[in-house]
C-alpha cells in the first residue's frame, strides 16, 4: 500500500484544476483530501480522477513511482472543510475565478487553520494583495498558479503577498519540485503575473496583424507552432537571444536598434472588435469547428501532444 507519511494536502474545489492538482500530489505520495460544497461533485470528481489515471497508466504516462491503485488510494473526498484541514500541511484552493468567492473561502480557512499550513490559491489573475487582504495567516499565503492542463504542463508561478514569509515561498517551491512541477518565483505581484503578460503580448500583436490583413489567422498560428513555438518548447526568449549571437551582449550590440525600430511600429492595445473576432473565428472554425464535440476532440489531441512532448523533454533535458 502507498504511504501518506509525506503529509496531507487539501484541495478546495473539485473542477478540472482541482482534479489535476489531486492527481499530481498523489503522484508524489501525498495523502489528498478533496473538498467541495456538494457531495455529488466530490463523487463525480473521484470517478473522473480514477478514469483519467487508468488512461494515463495505459498510455505509460502516469507520473510518480507508485502504481495507479496506490495513487488512487491516497485520494479521498471530504464533505467538511473543518475535517479536511485537520493535519494538513498544504491547502490548494481551486474554486472559480471570482474574487469575492475566493476571499470568502480564505476567510473561512483563516479561521480554522494552524500557524504551519500553507494557504495557496490557483488563481490565474487575481492579485495576492487583494485575495489575502486582512487575513491573520497572511504570512502563510501564496498564489501557486498552474498552467492548463497542469498534469502535462509543469510550470507553476509562485506569487507572494507583500507579507508572505520567505519560508512559505521556499516550502511551496520545494513541494512543487517534489511532485514533478517546475516552479518559478515571481518576486513581487504584478497584474497578469509573468505567463499571462507574455501570452497577452503575443495575443495583442497577433490580433493586430490579423486585423490589419498582414497575415491570415491560420498562417499566424503556423508562425508560432512551426516557428517560435518549436524553439520555445525547449528554451526561452532570453536564451534564444543568447544563442542567436555570441552571447547576450553580442546579441544586444547587433540587434537592439532593429528591435527598437520594429517595436516603435506596434500600435495601441487592440479593441478585440466583434468584426475581427468573427474573422478570426471563421479562420479557426475551418480547422476546428466550434461545436462541443470538435472542440473536445481537439483538446484531447492537444493533451496527447503535450504528454508526448513532456516525455521527449524529460529525455533530452541537460542535467
Image (tube, rainbow, N blue to C red):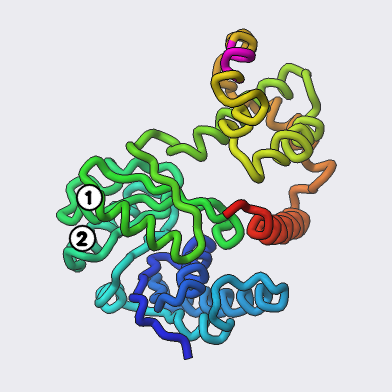
Which mark is nearer the camera, 2 or 1? 1
Q: Which residue is mark 1?
A: 165
Measured as percent of width and height from the top left, residue 6 is found at 36, 76
Task: Find the residue positioned furthest to the bottom.
Answer: 1
| Residue ID at (47%, 37%) | 194
| Residue ID at (23%, 57%) | 107
Task: Find the residue positioned furthest to the right.
Answer: 286
Of residues 128 and 82, which is closer to you in this image? 128
Of residues 197 and 14, which is closer to you in this image? 197
Q: Which residue is mark 2?
A: 110
Q: Is residue 145 above or below residue 18?
A: above
Measured as percent of width and height from the top left, residue 253 is found at 58, 13
CA separation, marks 2 and 1?
16 Å
Q: Is residue 57 above or below residue 24?
A: below
The question of residue 223 being in magenta is answered with: no
Is any part of residue 59 visible from this angle? yes
- The quarter of the picture where the C terminus appears is bottom right
Is any part of residue 259 visible from this angle? no
Amino acid at each position: 500500500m502507498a504511504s501518506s507519511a509525506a503529509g496531507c494536502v487539501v484541495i478546495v474545489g473539485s473542477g478540472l484544476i482541482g482534479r489535476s492538482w489531486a492527481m499530481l500530489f498523489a503522484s508524489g505520495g501525498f495523502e489528498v483530501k478533496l473538498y467541495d460544497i456538494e457531495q455529488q461533485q466530490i463523487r463525480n470528481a473521484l470517478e473522473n480522477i480514477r478514469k483519467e489515471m487508468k488512461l494515463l497508466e495505459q498510455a505509460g504516462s502516469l507520473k510518480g513511482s507508485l502504481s495507479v491503485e496506490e495513487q488512487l488510494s491516497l485520494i479521498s473526498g471530504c464533505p467538511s472543510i473543518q475535517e479536511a484541514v485537520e493535519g494538513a500541511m498544504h491547502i490548494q484552493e481551486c474554486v472559480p475565478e471570482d474574487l469575492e468567492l475566493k476571499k470568502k473561502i480564505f476567510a473561512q480557512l483563516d479561521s480554522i487553520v494552524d500557524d504551519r499550513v500553507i494557504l495557496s490559491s490557483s488563481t490565474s489573475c487575481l492579485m495576492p494583495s487583494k485575495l489575502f487582504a486582512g487575513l491573520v495567516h497572511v504570512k502563510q499565503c501564496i498564489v501557486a498558479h498552474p498552467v492548463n492542463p497542469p498534469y502535462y504542463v509543469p510550470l507553476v508561478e509562485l506569487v507572494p503577498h507583500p507579507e508572505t514569509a520567505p519560508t512559505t515561498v521556499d516550502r511551496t517551491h520545494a513541494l512543487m519540485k517534489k511532485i514533478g512541477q517546475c516552479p518559478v518565483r515571481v518576486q513581487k505581484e504584478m497584474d497578469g503575473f509573468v505567463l499571462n503578460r507574455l501570452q497577452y503580448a503575443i495575443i495583442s500583436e497577433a490580433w493586430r496583424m490579423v486585423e490589419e490583413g498582414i497575415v491570415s489567422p491560420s498562417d499566424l498560428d503556423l508562425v508560432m507552432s512551426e516557428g517560435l513555438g518549436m524553439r520555445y518548447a525547449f528554451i526561452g526568449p532570453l536564451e534564444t537571444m543568447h544563442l542567436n549571437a555570441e552571447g547576450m551582449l553580442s546579441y544586444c550590440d547587433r540587434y537592439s536598434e532593429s528591435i527598437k525600430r520594429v517595436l516603435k511600429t506596434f500600435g495601441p492595445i487592440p479593441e478585440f472588435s466583434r468584426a475581427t473576432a468573427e474573422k478570426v473565428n471563421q479562420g479557426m472554425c475551418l480547422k476546428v469547428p466550434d461545436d462541443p464535440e470538435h472542440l473536445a476532440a481537439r483538446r484531447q489531441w492537444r493533451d496527447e501532444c503535450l504528454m508526448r512532448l513532456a516525455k521527449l523533454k524529460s529525455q533530452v533535458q541537460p542535467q
